[in-house]
Image: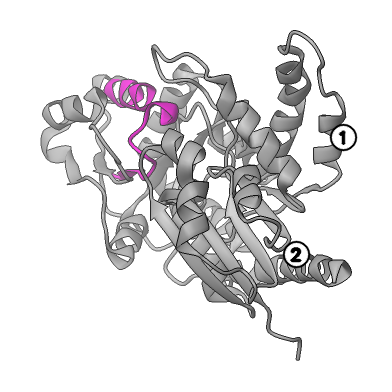
Amino acid sequence: MKKKLNFLFLEPFFGGSHREFARGLISHSQHSIDLVTLPARFWKWRMRGAALYFVKKVPSLKSYNGLITTDLMSLSDYKALSKGVCPPALVYFHENQLTYPLAPGEHMDYQFGFTDITTALAADRLLFNSRTHSEAFFSRLPGFLKMMPEYRPKWVVDEIRSKADVLYPGCRFPAEVLSGADSPREFPPLIIWNHRWEFDKNPDEFFHALNAVLENGTEFRLALLGENSQTIPKAFIGAQGRYGGRIVQYGYVESREEYIKWLKQGAIVISTARQENFGISAVEAIRYGCVPLLPARLVYPEIIPDAFHSQVLYKDTDELVEKLIELITNYSRFQAFRRKLSTAMGKFAWENLIDRYDEELERLAHMLCDLC
């Protein structure tokens, strides 16, 4: 039996994938992890000021073998304010501000990119949530540094790379084969949207594709799930009038049990995202029996096994519409396909990944011992 270690997890943006990751890690790890959070809103202010809150919220770090945090906090600020008593730190990068797309009308604030850089430099260990994300970050990093007019710190790239690795986030579903994942779905098929109601998930393209399907005379039902932290995008407001009774669920479902119930009823899950570094929502829907239609870019070619690429990945909106009509029209033919895809997603269950995470935490704790 390994010694139980103590860790502090500081999460400055406790919502969505950040919340799922923190809860999953804490509930599955053999080690003790204390969680301190801030609500999932005002992400820019979290990057600027979360360290100031946490350094007073947790007055003593002496009992901890290591610190865990995510990319929306300035770890360099936190370590400086901790005055040398901060234990070794692991940072999990869900996203990064060097490659994150800008909202319409928004201009890049380079300081957020530099906060990511100094956080990575201050970390003792750095984990990205996918190979795609890691490669995008390190591809962009040299060019980002070149924007500096002089005294460019070229050493930063190798320094960060030397402590970085990739480890998928665990998902909260059973590791074993799920009964009912391939059970018959009602007709017309239920299309699931379970992503955030935000610009980077590109809802305009999603609804454009649905409009084209309706114009073709192909029927469906629609469940619009997913979190919406502030204002509702116009695309979702317009959807209520456009699709009427076809919408069987409109808005975020607080209960995890009710959310899973909708996924089990779902037939198809669609993503039109412009930014996705892992895609927990898509993986969950596939695991519970939805056939996915996903862009042939971002992380999706990485998380979907190669054998399924031609059926579920699309190159543009026209191909999405074509595949969606074919899927709705001939849905009964996809039963064995659904079962295989659901089984393939089992590798992302926390039970199958937690040993790797515990090894990372133990490695972090050993860094503290090396300093003693």
Instruction: Look at mark 2 in the image and give the residue it sits on.
Output: 360
Mark 1 vs 2: CB contact within 8 A: no
Q: Is residue 273 magenta?
A: no
Give how far across and how far down residue 337 sits, in percent: 54, 51
Q: Residue at x 47, y 13 (%)?
A: 107
Kind of element beneath mark 2: helix
Vertical relation: 166 (above or below) 140: below
Farthest residue, direction front: 83
Instruction: Look at mark 1 in the image and give the residue it sits on.
Output: 158
Q: Residue at x 76, y 30 (%)?
A: 138
Kind of element beneath mark 1: helix
Give how far across and how far down residue 371 sits, in percent: 85, 66
User: Residue 33, can we see it?
Assistant: yes
Left or right: 331, with 211 as reference point: right
Give how far across and how far down residue 53 sits, in percent: 45, 52
The stretch of residues the image draws in magenta is 189-211
